[in-house]
Structures are given as C-alpha cells and as structure tokens.
Image (tube, grey):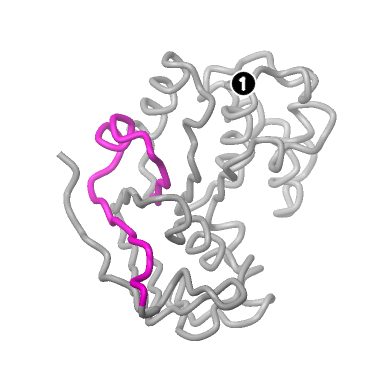
Amino acid sequence: MIRLRDIHFRYNSRYVLSGLNFAVNPGDRIALLGPNGSGKTTLSHIIMGLLAPEAGEVEIFGKLRRTEPDFQDIRGRIGFLFQDADDQLFCPTVLEDVAFGPLNLGKSSEEAKRIVRDTLAALKLDGFEERITYQLSGGEKRLVSLATVLAMAPEILILDEPTSGLDEATTERLAEILNESALSYILISHDLDFVRKTTNKAVTMRDLNSNGTAREPIHSRVA
C-alpha cells in the first residue's frame, strides 16, 4: 500500500531521515515510535506529499508519487489525523466540518449529510451536528477530527499523537474505535499502553548518528 525507499530529508543542514526504508501492507497497524525530533511526523508528511524528500522514492498504491498532482490522487484514500485538532477543524459547525471531505469527493448535499450522521453515530457523537466547533472540549475535538477523516472512507489512516490531551475514558473509546475498524494505519504515539492495545507492529526511529547517517529502524511486534 505504501513503500518508501532510501528516503533522505533535512531541515537546513540537519538530516532527520537518511536512507530510510518503510512499508505498509494490508492489515498492518504500525506504531511509529521514537524520541522527539527523530522524524516521525516528517515521515508522515512525506507520505501525504506535504513535504518532498531530498532523495528517494515514494510509492503509494502501486504508483510513484513525485509531484503535487500525484499526491492529490491519494489524499482521499489516506486519512490523516493531525496532532493538533485545531489544525483539522475550520468550519463553524461539526456538520460542516465532517461534510467538507465528502462534498469535495463529489457527494451530493444529502449524501454528505447521511455520511455525517452515520459517521458521528459510529463514534457515539449522535446529535453533534449543530454543535459549534470551537466550543467543543479537547476530547470532543479529537473525535470530531477523526470523524472528518473517516467520513472520506479512507483505505489507510495516519494518526499523529491521537491521544494527546485526552482523558482516560476518551482514550479508551478511541482504542475501541480503532480496534473495531478494518483499516490499516500508522500510529505515531508516545503512549505505549495505547500502542499495545491498538497496533500489531512497531517501528522505532532513532536520532541520527553524529556522522550524519541514520541508525537502522528496529522492527518488533508489540506485545
């Protein structure tokens, strides 16, 4: 589904990715672990075409992705949950935010409203349609952000620190939602308990060595 080969990326003179190889296959639920600054979010942004690598190949759904039009084709098929829910929610109401993706995919107004109702119900957010987005709690914003992603019927999810700022009950609810889904996903998280509950594989990314080369990622199954 996703294959990255020999990826190099740097901010100014500092490489954060050097010779990275990474793949996602159907059924994978991969935890992307590592210290801050090791390139986890950078990797996710390269997959989405938000950043361009200095070198290497990005292959998604069997096609090399090099230009902006190449990535436009995959953004309805890969659902990206940003680390900060406020980066994802920009419409006045929950209905408008969740309907935005389906409408952009060509759904009619009535189809989009049905998708919104069904998606919110699946997340136990029934009745949230007319709620004012900026008045939601942090946990509610996170779940509505997930609704905006799921409403587009993606084939893969990328979730960047999805439990950040969530209370225990909302975290458990999010774990249930992911475990009940049939989606493959990449999960970036420092919450190891959440990782153990929701993933079947882990990739640990390390900081670069002092000579500018990257250590190999460690692949391990999460117990």
Highlighted range, magenta: 185-210
Q: Nearer the viewer, residue 115 or 42?
A: 42
Secondary element type, mark 1: helix
Residue 201 percent location from the top left of the image: 24, 50
- Figure quadrant of residue 52: bottom right
Q: Nearer the viewer, residue 68 or 37?
A: 37
- Figure quadrant of residue 197: top left
Q: In which quarter of the image is the C terminus?
A: top left
Vertical relation: 213 (above or below) 177: below
- Residue 204: say if magenta: yes
Residue 78 percent location from the top left of the image: 53, 56
- Figure quadrant of residue 72: bottom right
Q: Quadrant of the N terminus?
A: bottom left
Disc 1: CA contacts within 10 A as few (<14), some (14-19) or many (>=20) = some
Q: How many marks?
A: 1
Vertical relation: 114 (above or below) 41: above
Residue 166 percent location from the top left of the image: 51, 22
The residue depicted at 62 percent of the width and 22 percent of the height is 138
Vertical relation: 177 (above or below) 45: above
In the picture of the structure, the residue carrying the numbered disc 1 is 140
The residue depicted at 59 percent of the width and 71 percent of the height is 11
Q: Residue furthest right?
A: 92
- Residue 25: say if magenta: no
Q: Which of 204 and 106 is in front in this view?
A: 204
Q: Is residue 217 left or right of residue 1?
A: left
Q: Which of 118 and 137 is in front in this view?
A: 137
Q: In this view, does 44 lie to the left or right of 210?
A: right
Q: Is residue 222 left or right of residue 132?
A: left
Q: In this view, does 14 lie to the left or right of 184?
A: right
